Image (spheres, helix red, strand yellow):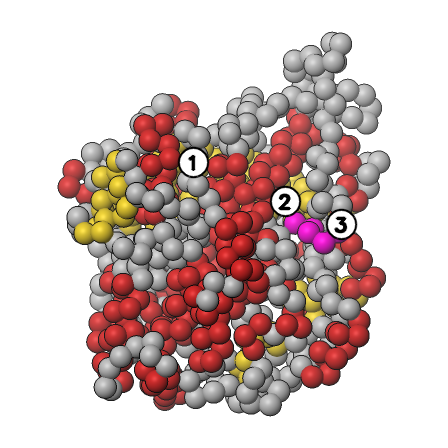
Amino acid sequence: MRDTPFAVRCKTVRLGAAMAITAAALVPGAQADMQSGDHNGGRPAMNRLPSFVVASSLRTTSYDGMSDDLLTAGLGKTGLAGAQPAIGNPAAPTAAELRRLAIWSNYRALVDMSVNGGYGRFWGPNVDLYGNDTLGEGKIAGAEYLAYADDGSGRQNVSLLVQVPTSFDPANPCIVTATSSGSRGVYGAISAAGEWGLKRGCAVAYTDKGSGNGAHELMTDAVTLIDGLTANAATAGRTSLFTANVPAGALAAYNQKYPNRYAFKHAHSQQNPEADWGKDTLEAVQFAYWVLNQQFGPRVDASNRGVRYAPGDITTIAASVSNGGGAALAAAEQDPGKWITAVVVGEPQINVRMPGDAQVREGGQRIAEAGKPLADYMTLANLLQPCAALADAATGAPYLTALPVASTTAIREARCASLAAAGYVHGGDTQAQANDALARLHAAGYEADSDLLQAPMWDSQAVPAVAVTYANAYMRASVVDNLCGFSFGTTNASTGAAGVAPAVSPMLTVFGLGNGVPPTNGVSLVYNVTPPGGADHRLATPDASFAGAVCLRTLWTNRDPRMRQSVQAISVNANLHGKPAIIVQGRSDALVPINHASRAYLAANSEREGSRSQLSLYEVMNGQHFDAFLGVPGFDNHFVPVHYYNLEALNLMWNHLKNGTPLPPSQVIRTIPRGGSAGAAPALSVSNLPSIVANPGSNAIQVRDGVVNVPH
């Protein structure tokens, strides 16, 4: 590992197997506590590194809270809101520079950073737990422990990270999980859950859940390492975050036919990592226990610490958003009460095994398609959204496309025509076809509240990227399979042509700036079938690679056994074993529709836990999946931040756990959009954001015997 530029104030130590259990000695202020209970003839039990942790990968870094810190990487509140941090030598970024990029980009990816949004006023490093601007730049001193979890093969290499702030109180210990959202790297939920946990004085347990920014540049054989640095795949060996499992001959042939392509861990590990997201989160918690015992456990001898905290001794909230939220729920289901105390998640991407009699109703009307898995609804959306964007009800939608407006309109019209010719939609003209496409999305469980978001979800490439990545993961496809004709590669910015050699390899900064699901950091989603050599999937054919989208869809509808087996492996039962839990989600979510996620989970939980259930759902009107988009014209005046309610939910759960304050029941929160014109919405204020209340009255969500009824 390269030296950090803060050698005076920050100390990084790599620990081998022999040194692994002495990490606490490296952390300023770590005190032996000889008051721990005896476990072995008057001596405390030895604090042993969990067997799943790769001891040789373990490293510890201390941050002084001035030159560098846990929350902002030394940038502070001002720097997080500022320009992308510079790299001293762009051809050879250091691990510390990549960490700073990762924290900067991941923090901004999950919250609204716009001037008139809530950053710096309702959330942000400067805002305390009570919503007051009291923390200045908000830098937080403490220690970080980073390591791989693996099964011994060197092919899983799940990143685990534990942050322990200096404000941690050993007498009142707490842990907050921050499993990465999306397919992001290990810092992927730093603003969603990490910030709240650090301000609370809790240790924060992160994991990239086996997806992360593991990338493999196939032409050069470069791979990423645990700290973001790159190395040759053969040299990296088992220290690689991810190396594609492709024989040398097959790789050479692939590179010749499809130059400048990339493999990504979530899509191409061939391990269906989503099946282990709950386990990964639990292992992050267990790693945090080891860390806290290393820092605060009693001395056994000169080199070793004992166990101060046994399983269940630490208040632990499983928290995160999106995929990280789904992972937290899965972890709580897998834990009968040993590690996790409570759950608070936002907009969880979760695949629920719905009991046969479970129902979701809205205004008394049953949602027929509630509880469908992502493999179903995402491939349908990828097929229909480009056409549905032209529907009458979607007029005025905000667009995030990088394509010229004329090209966008032509693509949508061509997609409608292809859908109609194949019988997926009906209508004698483009407008009728678009209206039918949107109606089919409604019938498939998408809320009318999300109509304005059908266009930007596809134009931003969120839906196509997820559809391709997850299909590869579920099919356990190799990168050389080109599943349904798709690959990941660099493209010409003007023409979309694939196969161009990048001026600067995206590998150098993919750890810091990538999100784990192309298109990302200069790597595009490519359709290889046509034209020769492939092109950006939006430009490869007039109808935006329609045949590839149909192929992805039929993997599900034709019941491919590999797809079905993988989806079965990731499905959950919604049994939280009586743990207090809160789910927050926006009704307008067009990426993870609420009928397939939170509402379905609540219904299944009600059936399976019955009177033992302590789960509340807070459904946010005018809330959607990407708070970071709230600075985009058309998002700013129509939608409100769900993150605000995630923070409120965490505070409610804390008060429940520490003071016995009852959790408010499930309810709809009727927010008020900021209004104004697109791009010029007035500043967000408390008048837009009514609180979660103890007595919701007519806004209560009724839950009983597997039936959820949500008021309009």
As drawn, the label of residue 217 is: none
Judge whether residue 616 can be spotted in this image: yes
> Is residue 255 shown above or below 303?
below
In the displayed structure image, the side of residue 580 where residue 249 appears, left or right: right
> Is residue 490 shown above or below 712?
below
Q: Main secondary structure of the magenta part?
A: loop
Callout 1 amino acid: Asn
Residue depicted at 51% across the width and 29% down the height = 336
- Most foreground residue, 518 or 151: 151
Q: Which residue is mark 3?
A: 153
As drawn, the label of residue 161 is: 2
| Residue 366 x %, y % | 22, 51
| Crowding near the residue tagged with mark 2, few <14, some 14–19, many ≥20 C-alpha atoms within 10 Å | many
State the separation of the CA atoms marked 3 and 1: 32 Å
State the separation of the CA atoms marked 3 and 2: 20 Å
Q: Which residue is mark 1?
A: 575
| Residue 199 x %, y % | 49, 39
Q: Which residues are magenta?
A: 153-158
